[in-house]
Amino acid sequence: MEESNTPGLGPLFEPAPVVFQFETPGWYVVFGILGLLIFIMTIKAILKYHKNAYRRQALVLLKTIENKFSTEQDVKCINDTMVLLKQVSLTTFNRNEVAELNGKAWLEYLDSKAKHSTFVQLENAVFQALYQNKLEQPQSAQQVFTNARNWIKHHAWKFWNSAPVGLLATSIAAAHLFHFSAFAAEKRSFVFSWIQ
């Protein structure tokens, strides 16, 4: 370092570089928020996986039905597919709304719950397989299986029918009931103590 020739001033000394450390409370807040976000995202992923378990099971059953049709050409596989779709619908949607549907109304209902679903266009093939136990065009069975797979994967899911949300709603209702009963018991004991 060069010495200054200015009278009265000594040499300039530079301070040591500041070492970066996570000692300020702001970093703890940032890491706490990041940890909380990671925790929430993990819980959401687990709930989504749990929520879609019925879809995975239905797709496995549909694959079994489809394999049976490809080996045996059994028209009853179309009926099995419709029964599977009814079971999935009963699991997901309002039981009173789904249980009474049949015929064209059932196919329209399926189309209304998933995008790019074309069960109504396959109405003749489905009704032939169900009611006449025959299928004039075997390729229409493949279209039914494709539509069923698409429907199972992409049908709309109702938020309030899920098990975790149902448990949450039940626990909230129980907490309110407990709070109300504790409040009522407290008021009752106050009134009885005042009377005595």
Image (spheres, grey):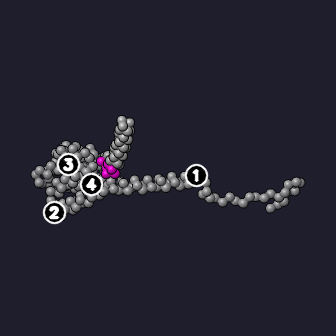
Residue 165 is a magenta residue: yes
Single out the mark in the foreground, 1 or 2.
1
Residue drawn at (18%, 60%), measured in percent from left and top? 69
Task: Single out the mark in the foreground, 4 or 3.
Answer: 4
Percent of width and height locating residue 44: 40, 53
Neighbourhood count class around disc 2 (C-alpha, 10 Å): few under 14, some 14–19, many 20 upward: few
Q: Where residue 26 is drawn, which disc sits there?
A: 1
State the SS at label 3.
Answer: helix
Mark 3 → mark 2, Cα distance in angstroms? 21 Å
On the picture, is 161 further left or further right than 69? right
Name the residue: 19% across, 43% down. Answer: 105
| Extent of the magenta region | 161-167
- Of the image marks 4 and 1, the number of the one nearer the N terminus: 1
The location of residue 186, given as percent across then percent down, is: 38, 41
| Amino acid at circle 2 | Glu
Residue 161 percent coordinates (x, y): 30, 48
Q: Nearer the viewer, mark 4 or mark 1?
A: 1
Q: Which residue is mark 2?
A: 72
